[in-house]
Image (cartoon, rainbow, N blue to C red):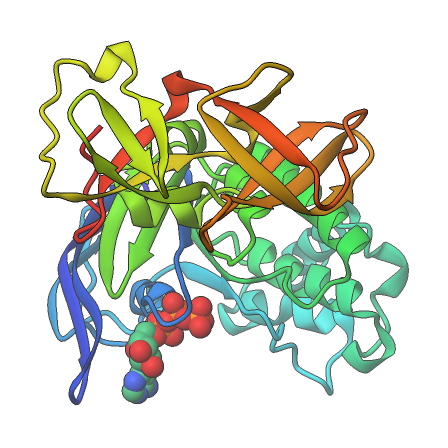
Amino acid sequence: MANVRLENIKRRFNNVTAIEDITFEIPDGEFWVLVGPSGCGKSTILRTIAGLENATSGNLYIGETLVNNVPARQRDVAMVFQNYALYPHMSVGENIAFGMKMRKMEPRVIQQRVAEVAASLSLEHLLDRKPKQLSGGQQQRVALGRAIARQAQVFLLDEPLSNLDAQLRDDTRAELKQLHQNLRNTTVYVTHDQVEAMTLADKIVVLSQGNIQQIGDPQTIYNHPANRMVATFIGNPPMNILPAKFTGGAFDISGQTLPLPASMKKFNFSTAQQLDLGIRPEHINISPEPSALTVDVKVVEPLGRETLIRATIPGSLQTLSIQAPGNIRPHPGDKLNLNLDLDYLFVFDATTGKKLY
Ligand code: ATP
């Protein structure tokens, strides 16, 4: 069993706190994705699990073993970095075989394993080449191959696709998903890419400033974000945030009045409180009738299946994005009446970002 358990892990670098206090447990065989803004501690968590970094305090378990003092090479983890870190003087085959040679496995077994791994990643025809004779995508597959060949219990991947161009990135992402379906290694994956996080993860961990904001499966993170940070970080284009005041029976959004949805009637928002209303671009509908919210169209981006409209609330600098069906093509300067799908309206405390509804 290779569940990975972090218990109150903290990491400081002099006066910088990279990880504040992280506790989570990844069950054996699951694929977890760490996301968050730059500098939030994603790589430090990964490097701590790998044993390349020591936690300042806390306990780390792989399986049932406390590994705080176990050196990286004895942890039975394989790590793939963004920059591949292949051995330049070795061929593809030698790179894939390296970990197994170090473990003094039988040459015959190594040869067979290299062939299997190369076949699973379509690298058979490249086994004799040196890394510099490969494209970025091929190098990345070799780096993955080297990790797979080691048959480590835990895979750690730090933005492994970020150097690939868009098409290759999509293909390799699908390959990775398939590989995990076959191998079922416990995997921890760091990425900036929303699509990778949403499509690959069993669970997404959203981090900010060294703290966990939310852990959940992709649909939960998207549909039920725990706070404003998660709500605005996950989703592209991001959720609209509209500063508002509660006036009694309604919200005032930059001088326009949105009646309080029936579902929120029992909630007692304070009229003194600064609120942020959150609504995703796909939950705003354009209405032919006069409606609660009127906006001025600024930019129209036709994307084929859909049209992305950027608009402002008249008399304010407040902007919002609207995702409309592809056949809807307003022009900059048009006025649009909007209906918000109130089932998907969030209310956050503007000061703390805490979700109020
Ligand atoms: P990115 O998405 O930009 O790669 P990240 O979320 O992976 O960022 P980390 O690399 O884990 O973030 O860094 C977390 C914090 O710790 C940052 O403030 C970083 O500057 C700091 N940090 C990381 N490594 C060191 C180090 N060796 N010495 C000092 N500070 C460090």
In-image side of 11 versus 325 (left or right) = left
> Residue shown at 11%/36% (left/top)?
271
Against 37, is 341 above or below? above
Quadrant of the rendered image holding ligand 1: bottom left
Compared across the picture, whether 130 is left or right of 101 comes to: right
**Residue in the image at 37% along x and 28% along y:** 220
Closer to us: 268 or 148:
268
The residue depicted at 65 percent of the width and 77 percent of the height is 86
Q: Is residue 129 above or below residue 88?
A: above
| Residue lying at the far right of the rendered structure | 125
Q: Position of residue 64 (x, y in %)?
A: 19, 46
Q: At which x and y percent is residue 163?
A: 68, 68
Q: Is residue 62 at all visible to an observer of this figure?
A: no
Instruction: Residue 287: give x, y in percent of width and height.
Output: 60, 18
Mark yes or no: residue 1 visible: yes
Residue 119: horizontal and vertical position, in percent?
79, 47
Residue 256 picture quarter: top left
Location of the N terminus (image quadrant): top left
